[in-house]
Amino acid sequence: MSRLVIDNVGPASSVQDGGRHGAQRYGLTPSGAMDRPSLAVANVLVGNAPFAAAIEFGPLGASVTAGDGPLRLALSGAERPAAIDGKPVPLNESFLLGAGKTLTLGVARSQVFSYLAIAGGISGEPMFGSLAVNARAGLGSPYPRPLQAGDIIPVQAASPSDERRLDLPKRADDPIRVLLGPQDDEFGDAVATFLGGEWKISATSDRMGYRLEGPPIRHLHGHNIVSDGTVDGSIQVPGNGQPIVLMADRGTSGGYPKIATVITADLGRLAQRQPGQPFRFAAVSMGNAQDAYRAMAQQIRALPDRLQEARHTTLDLDALATANVAGAAVDALDS
């Protein structure tokens, strides 16, 4: 057993896994990673199950130190500067963090969340089958709250292994796909406004919900309905007409009409959009949504088969400066 020490960390950083499922009838939200495909990438790189617990870092910088022994780590998700003793650490590739060494993460350059997976996973006490942190409910392990400087994460020491990498295509910047409903009939012509409008995520958003800024969506019969169930991606429209997309730490029911639902395959893309970046929605059929989910699930299952050996060549600049790189070349004007 070893440990990972949190030296510095910004807000919106916590331990997350694939979420706790099967207890929504008791009012217990699933929580879990905001971008599950990126969580899966980091975990597969270090030999873990795709949805094992990892550290989800928010958009600001952080630094962590290996405590009692070397750790094998992998970083995925948002692009950001990452280095050990000034040496850059690549994204989507496993690496070794030596005992006493510090990994420093900068501010996210694009997207929002990064995932740091540790080979062997994070040790903690599962709550309803998950380590995922839900701060509002006081659930999660090893800390039922966002991470703070000085926290110690129990982890497994690294065993000898070759490093692995994954070559991943850049995510498409297509419209976020939604299924209309279940209360789209409460909005009339405003459905066309919703689909035709340009939207931005508000800086006041969090893991519970993404507040959207855009054209106001008017209700036909008021903004209160009998509370009913919600899912990840439900888009509620409160009285001010500005939609809220319910995210990982949402409540399990709500009393605002829901104009649409973000399909599961696009939730990670939406979660990774930075505040102020414009985007649009596009309506799809139930069949299209199911096909997209199956394709995403198949891509995650195929990740272990796509692993490649990470090869690095150390360049000796001093030796290069004195080397005869021209070989047997001569001056063409030399007689």
Image: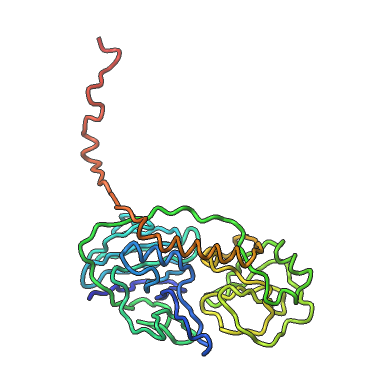
Q: Residue furthest bottom?
A: 26
Residue 324 in the image, given as x and y percentages of width and height: 22, 29
Residue 285 in the image, given as x and y percentages of width and height: 64, 65
Residue 211 in the image, given as x and y percentages of width and height: 62, 72
Residue 178 in view (yes/no): yes
What is the quadrant of the C terminus in the image? top left
- Is residue 235 found left or right of 36 in the rendered image? right
The residue positioned 48% from the left and 67% from the top of the image is 35
The residue positioned 42% from the left and 79% from the top of the image is 132
Residue 274 in view (yes/no): no
Tell me the quarter of the picture where residue 261 sits.
Answer: bottom right
- Is residue 141 found left or right of 112 in the rendered image? left
Mark count = 0
What is the quadrant of the N terminus in the image? bottom left
- Is residue 5 found left or right of 292 in the rendered image? left
Q: Residue furthest front?
A: 287
Residue 48 in the image, given as x and y percentages of width and height: 33, 68
For the residue pair 102 and 284, the one nearer the viewer reads as 284
The residue positioned 31% from the left and 56% from the top of the image is 164
Tell me the quarter of the picture where residue 151 sits.
Answer: bottom left
Residue 58, above or below 85: below
Q: How is the image coloured?
A: rainbow
The residue positioned 33% from the left and 81% from the top of the image is 124
Residue 122, above or below 28: above
